[in-house]
Image: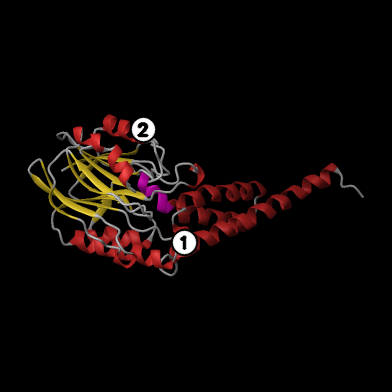
Amino acid sequence: MTASPAQRLLQVPSIVNGIAIPLVLLTLLMSALSYLGRVHLFFELLSHFRFQYFLLSWVPFVLLALTREKPWIWVAFFVLGLNGVAIAPWYLPLPALAESGPPLRIMVSNVLGENDSYDSFYNLVETEQPDLLVVLELTDQWARELTDLERILPYAVIEPRENNSGIALYSKLPLDDVAVPNWSASLGELPSITAQIDWQGKLVELVATHPAPPINPAYFEARNQHLDEMAFYARGLGRSTIVAGDLNTTMWSPFYQSLTRGAKLKNTREGFGLQPTWPSNLPPLQIPIDHILVSRDFTVLESRRGRSVGSDHYPLIADLAL
């Protein structure tokens, strides 16, 4: 017997609930497990997608509100809140800033070793005129293509590699006390760069870095070791500090949080939004894994994402004052 239009209409709420309830349970499960990042690398991976969970949880919330399925509405609302509280602080406006002198501009960019958009990257650097530039995944070819940067940034420490671990620090200011530490020794050579600059009469420590991607347990442990050792290093400096690089983790990871708490650093994104940087070709899945972290004596005047340079990462740019 064929259902009448009225009967079909009565079936709509149960159909909607049949979609919304499993969806809210899925987002609840992923959101809850993402708080267990110290237990397993899979759970830490889940922690990076809080913004996606927040957006996704609106779907069952709206559907359940339409069907007035009250117990489940509250579950959906809880999932919204669980992720919303992790996102909202990054958008809270900062206090009004007093006038200051010229800012210190820093730019960090993972250029992707196989990327050949050299001119696009060079043009961005020429346009943005950073005082400090961190380049990641620097290959020998990239290093050769960027030799003209010395016209804009005459001081440099260049460590090209062919295994995605190459790194360089370019500067408009002289670089002193330069070192190339390896905080991921268990994986071989993954260089970072440390140096000092004199900025308006104040000594500033620079750390350019690129920990291993946590693609398996060994790399997961190596990345965490890298972050711990870098935090220990930064904590012992006792001066103004900038850490810039592709950290292969987001602000919601417990390992990132240990780094910023232990080294007393803040993210330049605070008050400027999430500014996701990777993967550039998959907007719905983009997450913020490139970071500029600064000691708390810095004032962040601006933080923004740069335009695409053909890489799978967007550049990140920040203007700072001391």
Give the number of callouts: 2
Majority secondary structure of the magenta segment? helix
Q: Position of residue 115 (x, y in %)?
A: 40, 41
In terms of secondary structure, where does tag 2 sit? helix
Under mark 1, the amino acid is Ser
Under mark 2, the amino acid is Ser
In terms of secondary structure, where does tag 1 sit? helix
Tell me the mark number nearer the camera, choosing from 1 and 2.
Answer: 2
**Residue ID for mark 1:** 34
Q: Position of residue 209 (x, y in %)?
A: 28, 53
**Local crowd size for mark 1, using a 10 Å CA cut-off: few (<14), some (14–19), many (≥20):** many
Q: Position of residue 10 (x, y in %)?
A: 78, 48
Q: Residue at x 51, y 44 (%)?
A: 284
Cα–Cα span, label 1 and label 2: 37 Å
Residue 180 visible somewhere in the drawing: yes
128 within the magenta span = no
Q: Nearer the viewer, residue 180 or 35?
A: 180
Stretch in magenta: 85-91
Q: Which mark is residue 120?
A: 2
Q: Residue furthest right?
A: 1
Residue 271 visible somewhere in the drawing: no
Mark 1 or 2 closer to N-term? 1
Which quadrant: the C terminus?
top left
Q: Nearer the viewer, residue 179 or 203?
A: 179
Say left or right for 214 vs 157: right
Say left or right for 153 vs 60: left
Q: Residue at x 28, y 38 (%)?
A: 146
**Local crowd size for mark 2, using a 10 Å CA cut-off: few (<14), some (14–19), many (≥20):** some
Q: Which mark is residue 232?
A: none
